[in-house]
Image (cartoon, helix red, strand yellow):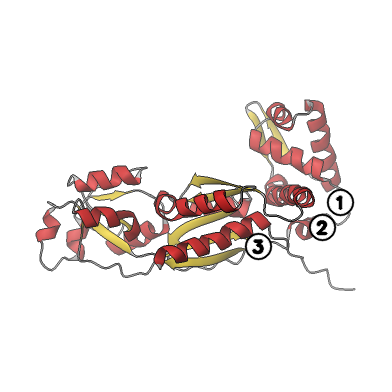
Amino acid sequence: MGRPPKPRRGAAGCLAMVCPHATMNAHQLRAFVAVVEAGSFTRAAAHLGIAQPTVTNRIKALEQDLGAPLLERLLTGVRTTDAGRELLPYAREIVALTERATEAVRTRGEPHGRVNVGSVESLTSYRLLPLIEYLYIRYPQVQVSVRSSDRSNAIDGVRDGVLDCAFFIDVRRADDDLNTKVLCCEPLALVVGPDHPLLRTSGLTLLDLQKTTLIRCDNAAGYHARFEDVLGRPGRHTRGRVLDLDSIDATKRSVAHGMGMSLLPAVAVAKELADGSLCQLLWQTPFQTYTQVAWRRSLIQDPALVTVVTAAAKIVREQLE
């Protein structure tokens, strides 16, 4: 007996291994993705601009073709089965590739289309705005949609096909199923208000930091997880309060008013450090962080995504020169 075929990379190859005789088509997969994202057959039909029975028939044909139910019908909507959850990221990629192929023919290979980007707020405000302006001027057919998200949510979104790429700040990490690119070293600054008692503390110790209120934005960003590891989890040591805010401006104002300390990218507090409204503590993080971008590995790279990643490297490099 011969050996079973090795799995091929990419959405089409993975699905071929699951069901080698599948005759699914992009219309069926598009209907499946629409139902999952809309949460109902009715809303999916409205989104696709077709009749609800057509959506239902396409889902049924897809389930019959794959030999497995993909959706559970509930009173509150629909839920994916285990098979549906396995199919979803591949279905999203195939639908996206189909749309890209169609647009590539129409636009003769020029970068085009929508790129969904995940990013923490500090990067969006201080690294990505020049990138968005650059793309707006140079590539009018490329549309960039930026969603605020922490590292873990953004990476999961990339893996699931909800996001095309994610920008984040963390130590260097490699993912087997994602491409990652380091854009620059991203120093962090531990800052307090100009009247904070820690500024008058000689020989600042870890215990001093543990007792101080920590104010965070980019709450679940990778660098915060590293900082928590340094400080020690609440309950293990004496720890001050932790305030989670969803705005970098609110965080900086709170720190400036003496409410506590905050660990932020140095680029995000450069102006405040220069004008004296914030002060940096003489404490260095025992880990090095980098601004990075991650995107899915694929047999066919989306020209618009390649344009965004290439432009990001260029813009960040120019910022540092």
Q: Identify the image quadrant of residue 34.
A: top right
Q: Is residue 105 above or below residue 30?
A: below
Mark 2 residue type: Ala
Marks 2 and 3, how far apart in space? Answer: 18 Å
Q: Residues within 10 Å of mark 2 (few under 14, many from 20)?
A: some
Residue position marked by numbered label 2 in the rendering: 16
Pointer 2 or 3: first along the chain: 2
Of marks 2 and 3, the one in the foreground: 3
Asked if labels 1 and 2 touch by Cβ distance under 8 angstroms, the answer is: yes
Quarter of the image that includes the C terminus:
bottom left
Q: Residues within 10 Å of mark 3 (few under 14, many from 20)?
A: some
Mark 2: which secondary structure? helix
Pointer 2 or 1: first along the chain: 2
Q: Which mark is residue 297?
A: 3
Whether residue 21 sits left or right of residue 69 in the image: it is right
Marks 1 and 3, how far apart in space? Answer: 23 Å
Whether residue 86 sits left or right of residue 232 in the image: it is right
Q: Nearer the viewer, residue 4 or 154?
A: 154
Marks 2 and 1, how far apart in space? Answer: 7 Å
Looking at the image, the residue that sits furthest to the bottom is 2
Whether residue 206 sits left or right of residue 144 in the image: it is left
Q: Which mark is residue 22?
A: 1
